[in-house]
Amino acid sequence: MKLLEIIEVLRTKKVKRIAYGVLILLIIVDFIIPRHEIHFFGDEIRGFWSLFGFIACVLIIVVSKWIGSRGIMQDEHYYDDGDI
């Protein structure tokens, strides 16, 4: 099986639904399982680390897009000197 065929199989709705289901299950488990040893203030709050990870992921995406639009991404003809 070629890599592109594997990617197409993984992009199906059924696989996406399974992945979302696993994600929701992990979040539910984070709320249910008690913490025995509290090392950080977030350990006292149920679901804190799930929420923290989600917010951190969204912030990484937003900041990366902002940085990319501000200077990393250039116009298609940015390096052309126009004399050719």
Image (tube, helix red, strand yellow):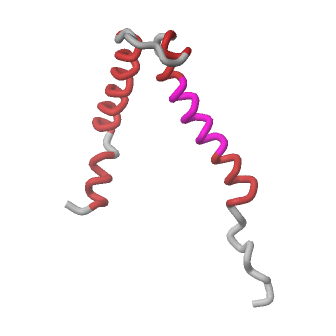
Which x, y percent locates residue 53? 51, 29
Q: Which residue appears farthest toward the left when viewing the image?
A: 1
Left or right: where 34 falls relative to 42 = left
Give residue 74's quadrant in the image: bottom right
Which x, y percent locates residue 28? 37, 15
Q: Which residue appears farthest toward the bottom when viewing the image?
A: 84
Name the chief secondary structure element in magenta.
Answer: helix
Give the residue displayed 73% in from the left and 77% down from the top.
79
Report the number of numbered marks.
Answer: 0
* Screen quadrant of the N terminus: bottom left
State the extent of the magenta-drawn residues as a range. Answer: 52-63
Left or right: where 55 falls relative to 76 = left
Q: Is residue 30 above or below residue 84?
A: above
* Screen quadrant of the C terminus: bottom right
Give residue 13's quadrant in the image: top left
Which x, y percent locates residue 33? 35, 11
Q: Quick check: is 53 in the magenta stretch?
A: yes
Give the residue displayed 28% in from the left and 35% down from the top.
14
Give the residue displayed 31% in from the left and 42% down from the top.
12
Q: Is residue 54 above or below residue 8?
A: above
Q: Quick check: is 61 in the magenta stretch?
A: yes
Give the residue displayed 51% in from the left and 10% down from the top.
45
Which x, y percent locates residue 72? 69, 60
Taking depth in this image into account, of 44 and 38 the one nearest to the observer is 38
Give residue 59's quadrant in the image: top right
